[in-house]
Image (cartoon, helix red, strand yellow):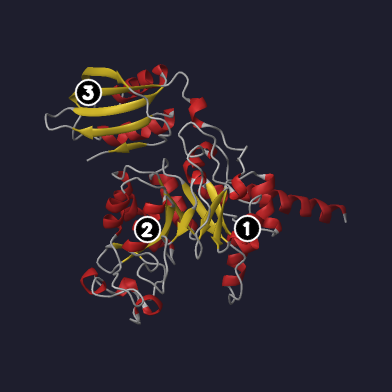
Amino acid sequence: MQIFIYLIFLVAALLLIAMYPGRGRRERMTLFMRQMIAHRGFHDNAGDAPENSMAAVRYAVEKGFGIEMDVHETKDGQLVLLHDRNLKRVTGCDRNIDEMNWSEVRKLRLFDSNEGIPLLRDVLGTVGGKVPLIIEVKADSLKEAERTSEDLALFLDSYEGPACIESFNPGALRWFRKNRPQMLRGQLSEKFRGLPFPHRHASFFLSCCMMNFLTKPDFIAYNVRHRNLLRFRILHDLFHSVCAAWTVRSEQELADAADSFEIFIFEGFDPPRASSEETKEDSVPACRPGGKKNGKTDNPEKKMNGIVRKYMIVSGTVQAVGFRYRATYIAQTLGITGWVRNRYDDRVEMEVQGSEAALGEMLKKLNEQRFIEITGVEERQIEVVPHEYEFKVRY
C-alpha cells in the first residue's frame, strides 16, 4: 500500500513537471493584455467582412483591437489566412488548401462576400504594427508544423509590430523555441472530446499541456468554457501562467471569465475598450473585463532604469560571415533588444538596447566568433524604445 502511495505521488510530480511552462517572460505579454483580441479579425460571416479576411483585419485595426488569425500553407508554399484545412465551409469549394496552388485559391470568395482569402504578407503590411497579432500555426503533423513555422518565421523576422504565435501542435512551439527563441509562443488547448482510439489518449496529454517541459510556452490559450477543469486551474492558479481565453462570445461570458484569464479573444459582439488613460504607454495594463487592473503584470517602464540604446556601425570582416545571426543569438542570451542589418558598404549597422555592460559584452563576444573580425565601431546614444522585447535581423 505504501509503495502504491509513493507511485501516486511520483506520477503526480512527473505530471506537474511536464505541465510547468515557466514564467520568465511574463512581462512581455503586457501588450497583449492591453487590448481585446478579435478572433479571426473583427468579422461577420453574414456580412462584408467574413473571418480571416482583409476587411475583418481592417475593421479590427480601426477599432483598436488586437487580431487572432490562422495561417495555412498552400501547395506551392504561400501562407494564407484560413482556419479550416478544407475550403468547403468558407468558400463552397470541397478541396484542401494544401492541395491547391495560390493561383487557384486567389479566385475563391469567402462566404457570400466579395472578400478573397488573403496572403499573410498582405495582412502584415495592412496591420503595420498598429495592433498586436496572435498568429495560429495550423498543422496536423510534426512535419507540417515545422515547415509552416519556418516559412512564418521568415515573415515575422522583418515584421516590426508586436506579434506572437500559438498552435495546438507542440511541434510548432518546439520549432520556434529552438530556431526563434525570442518569439513569444502559446500552447492552444481544451478538453478534447469524441476522439477515437488512439487519439483520445494522446489528446489527454495535449489537454493537460504535458509537452510544456519541451516547448516552454509564454502563455496558454485555453477554451473559455473549460476553465474549471483541474488541469487548467493548475496552469493558471498554481503555475500562474498567462492564460488567453478562446473564444469569448458575450459580455456575460467575458465577465464570468475575468478572474481566470489575462488575455481575451472574442467574437460575435463589440466588447468594451480600455479608456484613453488606460492605454497610455506608462499605464498599468487595464484592458480587463469590468475595467479591473491586472495587478500581476509588471509595468515595463519600471524596468527601463539603467537601460541605454545605441546606434552602431561596425566595420571589419562582418558580412558573409554570419554576423547578423550570431548577433541575434548573443543578444538573446544577454537580454539585449534591437536590430541588425547589412549596409551597402560592407559594414553592419545595429540598434542595441540594454545595460552598458551587456552592450559591451555583446561586442566582445561577437569579436570572439570564428571568421568575424571587428576593426572599428562608430556609435551614438539614441532614445530608448519602451516595450521592445526582441532583437531582429532586418533586410
Quarter of the image with the N terminus in it: bottom right
Mark 1, secondary structure of its residue: loop
Q: Residues within 10 Å of mark 2 (few under 14, many from 20)?
A: some
Q: Do the residues labelled 3 and 2 touch (CB within 8 Å)?
A: no
Q: Position of residue 188 (x, y in %)?
A: 53, 58
Instruction: Identify which residue is drawn at 45% across, 18% down.
Output: 306
Q: Where is residue 14 in the image (x, y as percent from the top left)?
A: 67, 50
Q: Which amino acid type is shown beneath numbered disc 2?
A: Tyr
Q: Distance between the residues labelled 3 and 2?
A: 43 Å
Q: Distance between the residues labelled 3 and 1?
A: 48 Å
Q: Is 252 left, or right, of 382 in this rendering?
A: right
Q: Residues within 10 Å of mark 3 (few under 14, many from 20)?
A: many
Front-most of 69 and 394?
69
Quarter of the image with the C terminus in it: top left
Q: Earlier in the sequence, mark 3 or mark 2?
A: 2
Question: In which quadrant of the rendered view does residue 321 lie?
Answer: top left
- Tell me the residue that label 2 is attached to: 59
Q: In this view, does 180 lie above or below 193?
A: above
- Tell me the residue that label 1 is attached to: 208
- Tell me the residue that label 3 is attached to: 314
Q: Earlier in the sequence, mark 3 or mark 1?
A: 1
Q: In this view, does 354 lie above or below 34?
A: above
Mark 2, secondary structure of its residue: helix
Q: Is 40 left, or right, of 261 in this rendering?
A: left
